[in-house]
Image (cartoon, rainbow, N blue to C red):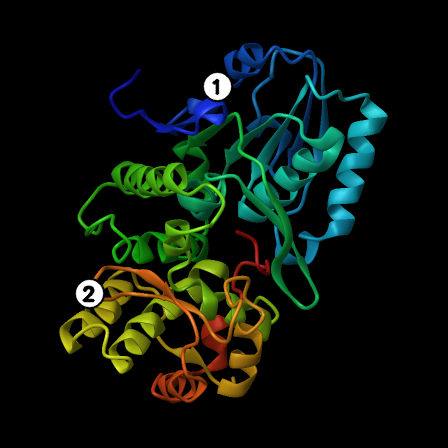
Amino acid sequence: MPQEHRRIEVPLGARSYSVHIGPGVRHTLPEVVAGLGAARVVIASARPEAWVPDPGVPSLTLAAKDGEDDKTLATVEELCRRFAEFGLTRTDAVISCGGGTTTDSVGLAAALYHRGVPVIHLPTSLLAQVDASVGGKTAVNLPQGKNLVGAYWQPKAVLCDTDYLDTLPPREWLNGYGEIARCHFIGAGDLRGLSLHEQIAASVALKASVVAADERDSGMRHILNYGHTLGHALERATDYAVRHGEGVAIGTVFAGLLAGALGRIDGARVAEHHQVVASYSLPTELPAGLAPDRLIALMRLDKKATTGLSFVLDGPRGPELVHDVPELTVAETLATMASVPPDHITPTDGTKGAS
């Protein structure tokens, strides 16, 4: 294995798999497919056809779309119809190539078709490489909220080819760094001085350890949602003009402020949340024009909110899920986060919500 390549294991017994990180790792796809014994594959790609190596078996390539607008049950149904038309069986495989919204929707289609067919992810964005493609969570959105329909379906392999990242526009780098920044507060330590390969590997290794301990969100896996409750609400409230990583970044700052307001952490730790997020050049403030009551209503739809408002917050025992957080405290904390001009969140690269 070349020195710059890293291999992270996700140890889940019979469902264990490897995450390969480094330049050119996508070219191992044929041997991964051969190892599965698949006779044919369907490739769902949101990227140019040349980005996916020949899998070594007969294949069908489908055009996928990155972006929250296409992360729907209708997309999943269309994928499954095309799988059936191609004659895909449960001993064959599906390959995704794209950002986090593609790995989510294609992963869910693979989970549902024939009650589950093997899936291999080739994530092409920083956000997808550090988070979305690993861990087996697949989901699509409903008009009422983000990721409300999904399934746990672990991939057979994840090939994080860092060559894919060479084409990312600046805003997509920020989108990924939002997830890396929140790792600082859930056990990864300070990743700011590391190389990109090391940052990706550290983020994946942290997630692998958490998923191995709690695959289905019954306990500690909730810590991976640090900053996500407000982050998802910001995405919905702005019709996804706020990108996922940007929302998580703002949500991470908010989580620090809320933990401080509840007396769970001291002022220095609250300030550290802002400092770390800002060091990645990520947004730290609420977009202008968003009323706290609108955000609170959206946060009540969060999947963790089984009773009242729930957030993953730092504290004396580290990050943990805190239920029944007083609405007044949440509203007051939101009010302390200064607004920024709306053009700060206007997409600059012609996309909306791609990740």
- In front: 272, or 137? 137
Residue tagged by mark 2?
Answer: 316
* Residue 27: image tag: 1
Residue 346 can be seen in this image: no
- At 62% from the left and 34% from the top, the residue drawn is 48
- In front: 203, or 319? 319
Residue 220 horizontal/vertical position (percent)? 37, 51
Up-down: is 296 above or below 302? below
Decide if residue 155 is on the left or right side of residue 141: left
Q: Quadrant of the N terminus?
A: top left
Looking at the rendered structure, the secondary structure element under dot 1 is helix
How would you rate the neighbour count of disc 2 (Cα within 10 Å): few for under 14, some for 14-19, many for 20 or more? few
**Residue that extends furthest to the left in the rendered view of this protein:** 268
| Amino acid on which disc 2 is placed | Pro
Residue 347 horizontal/vertical position (percent)? 53, 65
Residue 80 horizontal/vertical position (percent)? 77, 36
Up-down: is 188 above or below 323? above
Up-down: is 162 above or below 320? above
Decide if residue 279 is on the left or right side of residue 255: left
Residue 43 horizontal/vertical position (percent)? 66, 28
Looking at the rendered structure, the secondary structure element under dot 2 is loop
Q: Alpha-carbon distance for marks 1 and 2?
A: 45 Å
How would you rate the neighbour count of disc 1 (Cα within 10 Å): few for under 14, some for 14-19, many for 20 or more? some
- At 51% from the left and 12% from the top, the residue drawn is 31
Decide if residue 25 is on the left or right side of residue 346: left
- In front: 88, or 45? 88
Mark 1 or mark 2, which has the lower sequence index? Answer: 1
- At 21% from the left and 52% from the top, the residue drawn is 192
Figure quadrant of residue 350 = bottom right
